[in-house]
């Protein structure tokens, strides 16, 4: 039987997000501005702002860009009324999708997202259609390699993760995925950094409990193109999915 690794999909997706860094920064700017408008410009008193600032830090967003976005949110400038929405749907091969949306026009966004999904053989679902396959979790992607130190072992990192309040650790090839409850994210994040844990990705995520195997390279390519198109939409902040690419398919995607 061909091997499968959903966690490898996480790293594959991260590499693609890194390649679209300018677009990611633009979305983070909007998230920072809206968070500052809704809860104030102090991360100590605004948990939502603190979370977005941490995501921006991990992605190496320039500090002056972060400061400008926060000041825009706390200033007198005009800013539309944005709302958080979660859309659910299906992609090629029956893969479930959860989309975190930040929009000032829900009807426009729904129409745009529906059009993209249908273009690549997916469809927009109703509330609850796929949410039961996911859990909302705090998630960190931690490379095993450490500069100036021995590489993390699963046992050593698990001990640290449990001590700081995380509740799960999963091997991810040459990295690890640390998971926590959503309410514990800020505290666990602070404690991980305090222990010198360096990570390549951090944030709240819809983590799948059930996976859909994708063994067909053409279906996988269409799914990746769909996710790329969704992520290109300014209102779509993040896309989470439950595909489980076979090793052969993942290799073919990486070569492509």
Image (cartoon, helix red, strand yellow):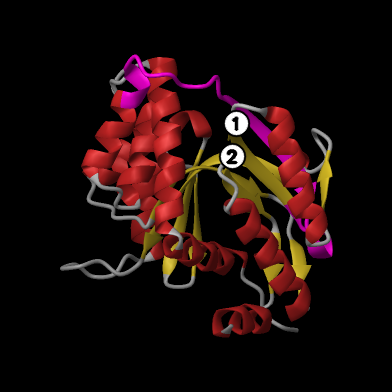
Res 144 quadrant in image = bottom left
**Earlier along the polypeptide chain: callout 2 or callout 1?**
1
Which percent across, then down, holds residue 136?
A: 60, 38
Extreme left residue here? 148
Mark 1, other Cα within 10 Å: few <14 / some 14–19 / many ≥20: many
Image coordinates of residue 82 in percent, x first then y, are 55, 24
Residue placed at 55% from the left, 43% from the top?
Answer: 234
The alpha-carbon separation of the residues under discs 2 and 1 comes to 5 Å
Q: Secondary structure at mark 1?
A: strand
Quadrant of the frame with the N terminus = bottom right
Asked if the stretch drawn in magenta spans residue 89, the answer is: yes
Q: Report if residue 77 lies within the magenta region.
A: yes
Residue range highlighted in magenta: 72-96
Out of 187 and 168, give the one closest to the viewer. Answer: 187
Q: Which numbered circle lies on residue 103? A: 1
Residue at 30% in and 70% down: 145
Say which residue appears at 62% left-offset and 77% top-offset.
Answer: 250
- 75 left or right of 112 in image: left
Q: In the rendering, which numbered label is found on residue 246? A: none
CA neighbours of label 2 inside 10 A, class few (<14), some (14 to 19), many (20+): many
**Residue receiving disc 2:** 235
Q: Is residue 142 shown above or below 205?
A: below
Contact between labelled residues 1 and 2, with CB atoms less than 8 Å apart: yes
Classify the position of the C terminus by image quarter. bottom right
Q: Is residue 66 above or below residue 200?
A: above
Q: Where, by quadrant of the figure, is residue 143 drawn?
A: bottom left
Work out which residue is located at the far front of the displayed protein and give it.
78
């Amino acid at each position: 039987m061909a091997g499968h690794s959903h966690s490898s999909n996480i790293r594959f997706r991260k590499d693609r997000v890194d390649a679209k860094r300018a677009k990611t920064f633009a979305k983070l700017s909007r998230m920072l501005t809206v968070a500052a408008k809704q809860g104030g410009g102090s991360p100590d008193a605004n948990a939502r702002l603190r979370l977005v600032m941490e995501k921006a830090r991990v992605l190496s967003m320039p500090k002056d860009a972060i400061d400008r976005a926060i000041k825009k949110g706390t200033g007198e400038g005009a800013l539309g009324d944005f709302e958080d929405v979660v859309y659910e749907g299906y992609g090629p091969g029956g893969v479930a999708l959860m989309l975190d949306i930040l929009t000032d026009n829900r009807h426009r966004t729904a129409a745009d997202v529906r059009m993209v999904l249908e273009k690549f053989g997916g469809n927009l679902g109703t509330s609850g259609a796929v949410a039961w396959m996911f859990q909302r979790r705090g998630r960190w992607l931690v490379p095993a390699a450490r500069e100036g130190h021995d590489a993390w072992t699963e046992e050593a990192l698990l001990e640290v993760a449990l001590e700081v309040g995380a509740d799960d650790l999963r091997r991810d090839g040459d990295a690890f995925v640390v998971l926590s409850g959503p309410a514990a994210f800020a505290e666990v994040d602070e404690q991980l950094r305090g222990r010198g844990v360096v990570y390549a990705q951090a944030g709240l995520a819809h983590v799948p409990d059930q996976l859909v195997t994708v063994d067909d390279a053409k279906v996988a390519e269409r799914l990746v193109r769909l996710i790329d198109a969704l992520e290109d939409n300014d209102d779509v902040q993040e896309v989470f999915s439950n595909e489980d690419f076979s090793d052969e398919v993942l290799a073919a995607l990486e070569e492509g």
